């Protein structure tokens, strides 16, 4: 199975901060990576697919980059509604696997 | 608008069975692969399995942890997806999400989830 490792597992940031979350795959996955945002008690919301393509309706302050084994999700200017947990997910091979999540909290 | 509505969750004892349903609307469900993803309380996301569309023979894939115990099926005439769960274990306790697989095989729409609790 392809293991997905996210770092950090949590972070504290202020509104307006630039935030970067890292996701590393245990083997190369080309650009077959997605990012999701999840708020407490809610279903995950797709943000990015194919490593860098924004889902429809996602604000442009979100961006993704990377290929192979190393990927990043960046929020250029953190907004109050962005405090949530973020997950990466690979779709290169079965079983599909998710990272452990990064919780973004208010400083 | 794409909508996925799960039902069928509840309390069950270890070794028991439960059947989850997912009602799809707002899109041609027969065209799409569909997945189940679960999330144990306070934990991360865990992929359960996939069913391909009829054009791809409705074949299935499963996570190792559920293979042989869980079965995914679909009824395209009813725009419905199912998850039959047998031999349930306490570690199967989770919210189960029905998820549409969109373009390029990414998960693009999620239901609100249904809670399954396996208690001893």
Image (cartoon, coloured by chain):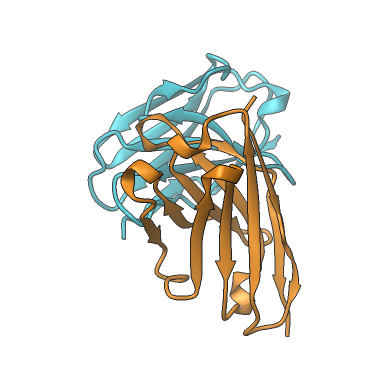
Q: Quadrant of residue B19?
A: bottom right
**Image side of residue B63 versus residue B77, left or right:** left
Q: Nearer the viewer, residue B11 or A92?
A: B11
For residue B93, above or below residue B114 = below
Depth order, front residue of B89/A75:
B89
Please tell me whether residue A2 is drawn above or below residue B33 in the rendered image: below
Q: Quadrant of the C terminus of chain A?
A: top right
- Residue visible at 71% across and 82% down in the picture: B13
Furthest residue toward top? A60
Residue nearer the viewer, A91 or B114: B114
Q: Position of residue A19 (x, y in %)?
A: 53, 28
* In the image: residue B73, left or right of residue B41: left
Task: Estimate the x, y position of residue B105 in percent, counting from the top left.
Answer: 38, 37
What residue is shown at x 65% (from left), y 24% (from top)? B1
Chain seen in orange: B
Quarter of the rendering containing residue A3: bottom left
Tell whether A103 sits left or right of B65: right
Residue at point 59%, 18% (across, down): A77
Quadrant (top left, top right, bottom left, bottom right) of the N terminus of chain A: bottom left
Residue B14: x and y in percent read 66, 83
Q: Tell me what residue is drawn at x 48 percent, y 45 percent.
A: B34
The residue nearer to you, when weighing A56 against B84, is B84
Colour given to chain A in the rendered image:
cyan
Looking at the image, how many numbered discs can be counted on the residues? 0
Question: Residue B44: in sight, yes or no?
Answer: no
């Amino acid at each position: 199975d392809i293991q997905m490792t996210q770092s950090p597992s949590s972070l504290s940031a202020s509104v307006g901060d630039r935030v970067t979350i890292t996701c590393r795959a245990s083997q190369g996955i080309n650009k077959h990576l997605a990012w999701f945002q999840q708020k407490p008690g809610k279903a995950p919301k797709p943000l990015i697919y194919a490593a860098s393509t924004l889902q429809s309706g996602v604000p442009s302050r979100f961006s993704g980059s990377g290929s192979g084994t190393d990927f990043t999700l960046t929020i250029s200017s953190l907004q109050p509604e962005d405090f949530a947990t973020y997950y990466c997910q690979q779709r290169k091979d079965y079983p599909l696997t998710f990272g452990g999540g990064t919780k973004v909290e208010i400083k | 608008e794409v909508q996925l509505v799960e039902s069928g969750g509840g309390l069950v004892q270890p070794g028991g069975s439960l059947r989850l349903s997912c009602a799809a609307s707002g899109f041609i469900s027969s065209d799409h692969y569909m997945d189940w993803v679960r999330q144990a309380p306070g934990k991360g996301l865990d992929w359960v399995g996939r069913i391909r569309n009829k054009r791809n023979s409705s074949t299935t894939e499963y996570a190792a942890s559920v293979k042989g115990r869980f079965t995914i099926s679909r009824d395209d005439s009813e725009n419905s997806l199912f998850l039959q769960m047998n031999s349930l274990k306490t570690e199967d306790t989770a919210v189960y999400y029905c998820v549409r697989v969109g373009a390029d095989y990414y998960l693009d729409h999620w239901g609100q989830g249904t809670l399954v609790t396996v208690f001893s």
